[in-house]
Image (tube, helix red, strand yellow):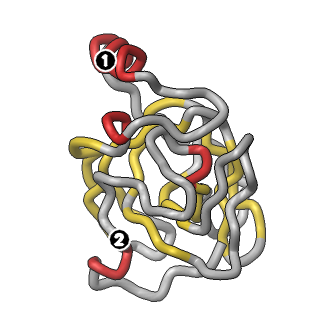
Amino acid sequence: MRKALLSTGVALVLSAAGVAVGGPASAATDCWGSGGAHTDYLGNTYGTAYCNAYTSGSVRASGATRGTLYAGNSWFVCQEKWVGYNNPQVGSAVNDWWLYTQADTSTGDGYHGWGWFPATKISGGRNWGKVSGLRECGDIPIFAFPAP
C-alpha cells in the first residue's frame, strides 16, 4: 500500500545511532520529522511522523489483523496506551502502547490496512512506555479509534 523511504543518509545515521534488532534502542532512534498527511479509511486526514520498525508485524484493529507493515522507516499518525491489549513480546521488549498507521499490505477488508502497530517493534521504544517523538492520539480531535 505504501512505504515511507528516506534517503540513504538517514538510514546510515540510524545505523550509527544504534538501531537495535530484537529490542528497543536508544532515544536517538525514536520518531522524527514529518511523514506528510495521510487519509484513513474513514476519510480523516492526519499529519504523521516517521518511525523505524526494526521488524515486520501485523497492523490490527477491532481484534483482527488488517495488514502487514514491513520493517523500515514508515509514517505513523499517533500512539495510544491500550491497557489490557499488550503488544506481542519481542525478545525482552514488552509494552501496551500502539501506533496508528496504515500497513504496507491489506487483508482486503474495509479498513484498507489501517490499524495499530505494536511499540515493541519500533526502534527507540522502551518497556511499558510511549515512543518519543510521536504524539498521543488523545491530543488529536478525532473519532474513537478501534482497539487493537
Distance, label 2 to label 1, CA atoms, is: 26 Å
Examine the rendered structure and indicate whether residue 22 appears above or below residue 12. Answer: below
Between 14 and 64, the one nearer to me in the picture:
14
User: Residue 141 occupies which quadrant of the picture?
Assistant: bottom left
Identify the residue position indicated by label 2 in the image.
Answer: 136
Q: Counting residues from the N terminus, which is met first, the one under dot 2 or under dot 1?
A: 1
Between 52 and 2, the one nearer to me in the picture:
52
- Amino acid bearing label 1: Val
User: Residue 71 occupies which quadrant of the picture?
Assistant: top right
Residue 59: give its label. none
- Amino acid bearing label 2: Glu
Dot 1 falls on a residue whose secondary structure is helix
Horizontal arrangement in the rendering, residue 38 relative to residue 84 (left or right): left
Horizontal arrangement in the rendering, residue 64 relative to residue 22 (left or right): right
Q: Quadrant of the N terminus?
A: top right
Which residue occupies 32% across, 57% down?
Answer: 134
Marks 2 & 1, CB-CB < 8 Å contact: no
User: Residue 30 occupies which quadrant of the picture?
Assistant: top left
Between 84 and 35, the one nearer to me in the picture:
84
Which residue occupies 47% across, 87% down?
Answer: 144
Which residue occupies 56% across, 56% down?
Answer: 127
Q: Residues within 10 Å of mark 1 (few under 14, many from 20)?
A: few
Examine the rendered structure and indicate whether residue 46 appears above or below residue 139. Answer: above
Q: Position of residue 146 (x, y in %)?
A: 59, 81
Which residue occupies 28% across, 78% down?
Answer: 140
Q: Residues within 10 Å of mark 2 (few under 14, many from 20)?
A: some
Identify the residue position indicated by label 1 in the image.
Answer: 13
Q: Position of residue 95 (x, y in %)?
A: 61, 61
